[in-house]
């Protein structure tokens, strides 16, 4: 099942307090970038973030879910309505995320 553009718009609105949030559509789902690093994505109308130490520390009870078959597990954001938490989460995760790959 593909994610809806309405859910994408909702997540982007929740993240609007952060500078440099972008996204890329990919096979009916959306990859979310923060300052050019992939932080997670929207899969089947669920906002999932990469499993980093800081994300796990901030969300110790978060469920690990597969975004799609064959992918690595990601953490499900339950508190999607809390903009301040989302800001804190993405800022905490940033340094742990890999640098963007160089384009050829």
Image (cartoon, helix red, strand yellow):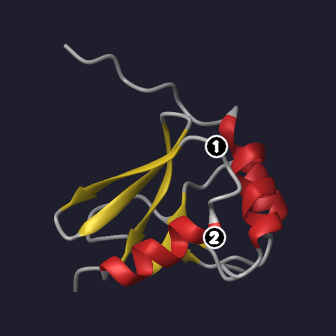
Q: Where residue 22 sits in the image (x, y, percent)? A: 44, 48
Q: Where residue 50 sits in the image (x, y, percent)? A: 55, 54
Label 1 packing within 10 angstroms: few (<14), some (14-19), many (20+)? few
- Considering only vertical position in the picture, is 88 above or below 12? above
Q: Where residue 44 sits in the image (x, y, percent)? A: 34, 82
Query: Which residue position holds label 1?
Result: 19
Q: Which of 23/51 is in front?
A: 23
Q: Residue at x 64, y 43 (%)?
A: 19
Q: Earlier in the sequence, mark 1 or mark 2?
A: 2
Q: Which mark is residue 14?
A: 2
Q: Secondary structure at mark 1?
A: loop
Q: Is residue 29 left or right of residue 16?
A: left
Q: Measure the C-alpha gap from mark 1 to mark 2.
A: 12 Å
Residue 79 is at least partly visible in this image: yes
Residue 65 is at least partly visible in this image: no
Q: Where's the C terminus, which quadrant? A: top left
Q: Quadrant of residue 6?
A: bottom left
Q: Residue at x 43, y 81 (%)?
A: 7
Q: Residue at x 32, y 77 (%)?
A: 5
Q: Is residue 29 left or right of residue 66?
A: left
Q: Where's the N terminus, which quadrant? A: bottom left
- Considering only vertical position in the picture, is 87 above or below 19? below
Q: Is residue 38 left or right of residue 35?
A: left
- Considering only vertical position in the picture, is 4 above or below 95? below
Q: Which of 96/87 is in front?
A: 87
- Considering only vertical position in the picture, is 40 above or below 7? above
Q: Which mark is residue 63?
A: none
Q: Secondary structure at mark 2?
A: helix
């Amino acid at each position: 099942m593909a994610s809806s553009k309405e859910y994408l718009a909702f997540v982007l609105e929740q993240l609007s307090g952060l500078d440099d949030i972008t996204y890329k559509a990919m096979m009916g789902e959306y990859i979310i970038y923060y300052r050019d690093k992939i932080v997670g994505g929207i899969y089947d109308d669920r906002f999932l973030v990469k499993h980093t130490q800081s994300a796990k520390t901030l969300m110790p009870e978060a469920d690990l879910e597969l975004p799609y078959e064959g992918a690595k597990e990601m953490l499900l954001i339950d508190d999607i309505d809390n903009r301040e938490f989302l800001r804190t989460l993405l800022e905490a995760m940033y340094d742990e995320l890999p640098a963007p790959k160089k384009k050829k």
